Amino acid sequence: MYNKEQIIAEILSGKSTDVQQEKGAVYAPANIALCKYWGKRDSILNLPMTPSLSISLAQKGSHFAFEVVNEKTDRLHLNGQAVEEQHDFYHRLFSFINLFRSHAQPRLNIHITSTIPIAAGLASSASGFASVVKGLNELYRWQLNCSELSILARLGSGSACRSLWDGFVEWQYGSRDDGMDSLGVPLDYKWPQFRIGLLLASSNKKSISSREAMAITKQTSPFYTLWPQQVATDLMGIKSALAEKDFAAVGQASERNALAMHATMLTATPAIAYSNAQTTAWMHQVWHLREDNMAVYFTQDAGPNLKLLFLEESTEDILQLFPEVEIIAPFPSR
Ligand code: PMV
């Protein structure tokens, strides 16, 4: 078993951790998994039980700005609001940053601006930790590449390792105990017409963290043993459908994968149910629309919000049917 410090030392070997740049600003997109990561084989290094595949959300993500300050404590602002030292988020962020620096180093003033609701199952920790490692890469001028940053981001939050790139990204889960082969890899499928519709059923903090929920599911769900096989089938299905631009096949496999993940959670002890009445109502609406031959599918993460999957040609219909939807075009530069 390795610890985070050993992995960081290996990636940064020969690199300095003296501050090189006093100020900087970076950005990382959020990502939504079409084939989910659910369950760790190593909970220290966030090594997953299975591979996964996501799409990055272009302009929806985290802006991370830092400034070196001559003060005794670090300061943090989230969406313009000061975050107190006692706050969980402050603790989680600086415990991560402290893995990379000694106490003698100057403190930082950090501003994180998230363009998606924090901790509502909308993958804000993914863009958050990806933006932090990109920021540290500037602060120390390590000049690490995206693959190295992906491994470091994974140490903060598993799904963050997919947020170093735009477009479709596969997290190759790897087999090594040190996780050096467990990182994001960008996939070469471009699909400018692909759309994601965010439906916010609640912007409250999640009822149970994904870390805790994954552990309970893995330990107690009788269906968890089926999960790796389900992922293997869905991942293969999604990749070949992406290669053929077969939207119905991408949608079907993605939706089934999300439902299978939630089915494993519902059968855990205690049961973990992220959906609320609104989530379920939207699911039924999507299924009815498909009966009427509309090509719309959904996926759902560790929260009650739903993400619709559809193509550009359905935009008008989606806006009419789901007036509260926020539509994202993941490939904006057409
Ligand atoms: O990276 P975490 O610990 O926030 O877990 C993410 C889990 C899911 O969002 C439900 C699935 C995924 O692959 O993103």
Image (spheres, rainbow, N blue to C red):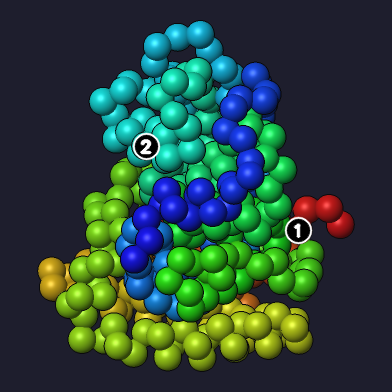
- Tell me the quadrant of the picture where the C terminus can be found: bottom right
Mark 2: few/some/many CA within 10 Å (<14, 14-19, 20+): few
Q: Which residue is mark 2?
A: 95
Mark 1 vs ligand 1: CB below 8 Å: no
Extreme left residue here?
A: 270
| Residue 257 drawn above or below residue 115 | below
Q: Nearer the viewer, residue 150 or 63?
A: 150
| Image spot of residue 171 (x, y percent) | 56, 69
Position above or below: 94 against 240 = above
Which residue is found at the position 50% from the left and 88% from the top?
232
Q: Residues within 10 Å of mark 1 (few under 14, many from 20)?
A: many
User: Quadrant of the rendered structure where residue 53 is?
Assistant: bottom right
Please name the residue that numbered disc 1 is placed on: 331
Q: Residue at x 26, y 25 (%)?
A: 86
Quadrant containing the N terminus is bottom left
Residue furthest front in the image: 14
**Is label 2 in a helix, a strand or a loop?**
helix
Residue 286: image location, x then y, percent: 49, 73
Q: Residue at x 54, y 39 (%)?
A: 132
Residue farthest right in this picture:
334
Dot 1 or dot 2: first in sequence order is: 2
Q: Percent x, y for residue 68?
A: 57, 17
